[in-house]
Amino acid sequence: MTAPKNGLFISFEGIDGAGKTTHIEGVAAAFAAQGRAVCRSREPGGTPLAEALRGLVLQQEMDPLSEALLIFAARNDHLRQVIEPALARGEVVLCDRFTDATFAYQGAGRGFDPAVLQTLERLVQGRPGAEPRLIQPDLTVWFDLPPELAAARLADARLPDRFESQPLEFFRQVQRGYAERAAAAPGRFARIDAALPREQVWEQIVALFEAKGWWTAGLSQGARHA
C-alpha cells in the first residue's frame, strides 16, 4: 500500500484587491492535477460557526479587542474542525488568509496591541507535546501590491465591507504589517509581485511551487486560468 503523503498548509495573504483569491483556484487545480487532495478554505470562516462570526466582523461596528477576539474564536473552530483534520488526512490546505492577516489588519491597521495578539495566537494555535509548537502554515504566499493600485482595482467592486471601505492610510499600515511579518519569518513567507499582469503573477506562483518541489514542471501549466 502506498504511504500517505504529508499534509501541506499554505496560506495566501495580501491587502484587499491584491488578487490572491483569484489565484487560489489555479493553485488548487495544479495540486489536484498532481494527484493531491485539496482542502480550500478562508479566514475568518471555513465552518458554520466561523462563517457566522465572519459576518459580524465584516459588517458590525465594534472595538478592536472585540474584533480580535471574534477572529481568534473563528480561527479556533476552523483549526479544530477543518485544518487539522485535513492535514492529518494528508491533504493540501489552501487558506485565504490566516494569522498574518490578524497582525496586519488588527495589529498594524487598527493599531491594536501586538502583545495581546501574540497571547491569543498562543492560546488558539499552541499545541502541547515534547516540543510545544504553534500551528503555522508551511508556506505563506504574500501578494504584495501598493495600496494605491489596490484601491483602483476595488473602485468598481461590489459594495465594500467595513474593511474594504477603510481609507488609503489604513491599507498603507496593513501593508507595513505584512512586510514586518515577512521580515520576521523569511523562511515561511514568499513574496509575489501582485502589481504585474495576471499571467506574470501566475508565472511567479508556478516558479515558487516548482522550486519547492511540490509541483512537477509542466503539469502545473495546465492549471493556468485565463
Image (spheres, rainbow, N blue to C red):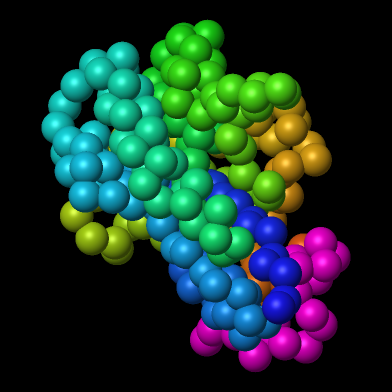
**x then y, percent, for residue 37:** 55, 72
| Foreground pick, 105 / 212 | 212
Residue 78 vertical placement versus 3 (above, below) = above
Residue 110 vertical placement versus 44 (above, below) = above
Q: In the image, 11: left or right of 17? A: right
Residue at the image position 31 percent from the left and 14 percent from the top: 65
**Segment colored magenta:** 209-226
Q: Is residue 211 magenta?
A: yes
Q: Is residue 37 magenta?
A: no
**Displayed quadrant of residue 61:** top left
**x then y, percent, for residue 217:** 81, 82
Q: Quadrant of the N terminus?
A: bottom right
| Foreground pick, 207 / 35 | 35
Farthest residue to the front: give it. Answer: 1
Residue at the image position 21 percent from the left and 49 percent from the top: 48
Q: Is residue 170 visible?
A: no
Farthest residue to the left: give it. Answer: 60
Residue at the image position 27 percent from the left and 42 percent from the top: 50
Q: Is residue 74 visible?
A: yes
**x then y, percent, for residue 213:** 82, 67
Residue at the image position 53 percent from the left and 19 percent from the top: 122
**x then y, percent, for residue 224:** 60, 84
